[in-house]
Amino acid sequence: MTVKAFNVKVSNKADLHEALIRNGYYPPSLKCGMATEAYLIGVMEKTYWCLRAEDVRIRLCPKPPDKNILLEKFRKLTHDNNINHGMLEDKWPDKKWLLAVISTLNPEDEIFKKDYFPPPRKNNIEEQKTINVPNGFFEGLPDSRRRVKRHALRIVGEGRAKQKVQYLKTV
């Protein structure tokens, strides 16, 4: 097919996404990070695996776990089934698509059981970042009583941002 003929049918990423859906694929949402042009073309060329709409088996998960847990389950399932998913480390699919893939490939997963409740979220970012404070600075000072942190300190926000970047690099 010539470039001109291709461009008549598909002129942008949204058109390519729609074309995949019209051809029976179940790609991740166009707004998520995984739906890059390279991924969508890879699905079209059958280089990357993507669910087919007729194969999707949705199982209910009233309280899904964090996205990181779903990503680990997804990676394990695709590795065990020798599937080339085409997902980059910094371009992740959305939760809805991950749940659809997991429920299709492994409908008996623990997250779909009646008694499943996700583990509590960890807030390691605030605990791991340290701020240099002179010795004795907080001695004798009472704890803050303010409930609303409308004007939070910039040093705390920057510390959280740096810690979040470190955390995301390790994931």
Image: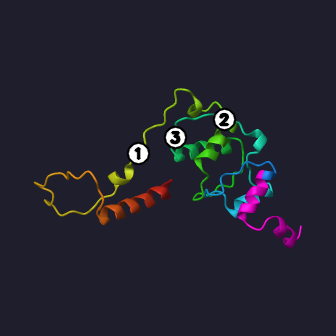
Image x and y of residue 169, in percent? 49, 59
Residue at 62%, 57% in the rendered image? 31
Question: In the image, 41: left or right of 71?
Answer: right
* Residue 83 forms part of the magenta stretch: no
Q: Residues within 10 Å of mark 2 (few under 14, many from 20)?
A: some
In this rendering, does residue 75 appear at all? no
Q: Is residue 113 visible?
A: yes
Q: Secondary structure at mark 2?
A: loop
Residue tagged 1: 122
Q: Amino acid at mark 3?
A: Pro
Query: Which residues lie in the magenta part?
Result: 1-21
What residue occupies the far left of the structure in this picture? 140
**Residue of label 2:** 106
Q: Quadrant of the rendered structure where residue 54 is?
A: top right
Residue 113 at x, y percent in the picture: 57, 28
State how far apart marks 2 and 1 are (Cα): 26 Å
Residue shown at the point (28%, 53%) measured from the top left = 148
Q: Quadrant of residue 3?
A: bottom right
Q: Which residue is found at the position 72% from the left and 47% from the top? A: 83
Direction from residue 48 to residue 74 in the image, left or right: left
Q: Which residue is disc 3 drawn over?
A: 65
Q: Amino acid at mark 2?
A: Asn
Name the residue furthest bottom: 4
- Residue 77: % across, % down: 65, 41
Residue 3 placement, left or right of 163: right
Q: In this rendering, would 83 be left or right of 166?
A: right
